[in-house]
Amino acid sequence: MIIRCESCGKEKDMLSWQKVCYPCQEEAYKEKIRAGIINGDKTTTENETDVYCPYCGGIYEDDWRIYEEGWHDFECGFCEKSFETKTEISHSFSTYRIDNK
């Protein structure tokens, strides 16, 4: 169903009960995390899909280290404070029947 997003105003394919499109929901979630870090309510993040600086909320997306499992030291390019991140990798599997021909 095509619905106008209440946040960005763009018409998007959404479920009938949705009022905000997925990209806007994702951005609002990131802003909520960042606000919690900036005001001091959050000093760590866990099981996120992005790496957030725990001091200023800066987001790291294109650093090769975040794709290798284990602990990694960072110096924030935004606030220049040091922090560490732990990358955890998981796998999921799908199976499909092969029709006999």
Image (cartoon, grey):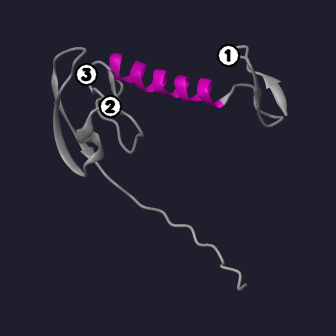
Tell me where residue 3 sits by quadrant.
Answer: top right
Q: Front-most of 58 and 92? A: 92
* In magenta stretch: residue 37: yes
Q: Is residue 2 left or right of residue 84?
A: right
Q: Front-most of 67 and 16? A: 67
Could you tell me what secondary structure mostly forms the magenta stretch?
A: helix
Label 3 vs label 1, nearer the camera: 1
The quarter in which the N terminus is drawn is top right
**Residue 20: % across, % down:** 70, 25
**Secondary-structure class at tag 3:** loop
Tell me where residue 42 sits by quadrant.
Answer: top left
Query: From mark 2 to mark 3, how far is it between C-alphas?
Result: 19 Å
Q: Which mark is residue 62?
A: 2
**Residue 47: % across, % down:** 39, 45
Label count reads 3
Q: Which mark is residue 7?
A: 1
Q: Is residue 49 above or below residue 88?
A: above
Magenta range: 22-40
Q: Is residue 12 left or right of residue 79?
A: right
Residue projecting furthest to the bottom:
100
Q: Earlier in the sequence, mark 2 or mark 3?
A: 3
State the residue position of label 3.
Answer: 55
Q: Earlier in the sequence, mark 3 or mark 1?
A: 1
Label 2 vs label 1, nearer the camera: 2
